Amino acid sequence: MPSAMDSLKHAPVAGVRPKDAASLILIDRCAGGARVLVGRRGSGHVFMPDVYVFPGGRRDARDHALPFSADLDTLVLEKLLLGTSSRLTPNRARALALAALRELREETGIGSGMAPDLSRLRYVARAITPPGNVRRYDTRFFLAFSDETVFDMTSLGDSSELQDVRWLDIADLSGLKLPAITKTVLEDVKNLMIADPSLSFGNPVSFYFMRHGRFVRSRL
């Protein structure tokens, strides 16, 4: 298998350039199992309509200036910067984490009412939308356990971006229409948690993209 750096050198760049994006995989493990928060994108969306996804979206220019109370774990920051171009500075990497938390609040109502603590976020996957799509994103998937956060769950609900926001048992992915990459990342998360239930900050990170028309999985 090629190294992550070699794979990145051959990642597709022609056509629509992928935009930086971030998603937050919020896991509730309080009931003994593990549930993940998802919501359905509306039918009016140009990109991935009518499917259930994690909260997330494109990184905005203002995200780098958002306040935070504690920084990313050093192992997480190192993984975010591994194998990327020079344009992804530590500030931009941190902005991706802040974007994921901002999108969580905007799309589900979940927030803490204070500057977010980035130190509890894990980094679990990265995926680039294949060429040929009307929009393309270079998405970093962060993960947080609800019992390690100070999120106010009483505000949880639907928004203009996500409807039917619900907790999904990650041991049973049937019954909901999930994009292939969402299922794949959830399988990664399940396997990571089997190997290490506490999910260490230096865990392996899967990187998915298309190369020469083939779906490639590398490791960061």
Image: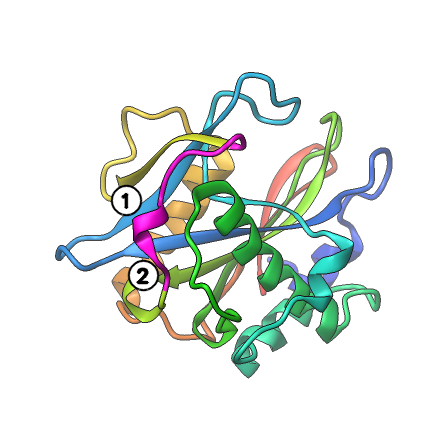
Please identify the residue farthest to the top as the structure is shown.
Answer: 43
Q: Is residue 94 above or below residue 158?
A: below
Instruction: Pick the quarter of the image with the N terminus.
Output: bottom right
Q: Is residue 53 above or below residue 199?
A: above
The label shown at residue 170 is 1
- Callout 2 amino acid: Ser
Instruction: Pick the quarter of the image with the C terminus.
Output: bottom right
Query: Label 2: how many residues lie within 10 Å, few (<14), some (14-19) or many (20+)?
Result: some
Residue 154 lies in the magenta-colored region = yes
Whole-percent x, y for residue 108 in the image: 44, 43
Tell me the residue at 35%/68% (across/down). 150
Which residue in the structure is indicated by mark 2?
Answer: 146
Whole-percent x, y for residue 168 in the image: 28, 39
How was the colour assigned to the protein in this rendering? rainbow
Describe the element under mark 2 as helix, strand or loop. helix
Q: Within the image, what quadrant is residue 13 found in? A: top right
> As rendered, which of 31 and 207 lies closer to the eye?
31
Q: Which residues are magenta?
A: 151-161
- Callout 1 amino acid: Ile
> As rendered, which of 210 and 158 lies closer to the eye?
158
Tell me the residue at 26%/61% (across/down). 194
Q: Within the image, what quadrant is residue 196 found in? A: bottom left
Horizontal side of 63 relative to 113 (left or right) equals: right
Tell me the residue at 68%/35% (across/down). 130
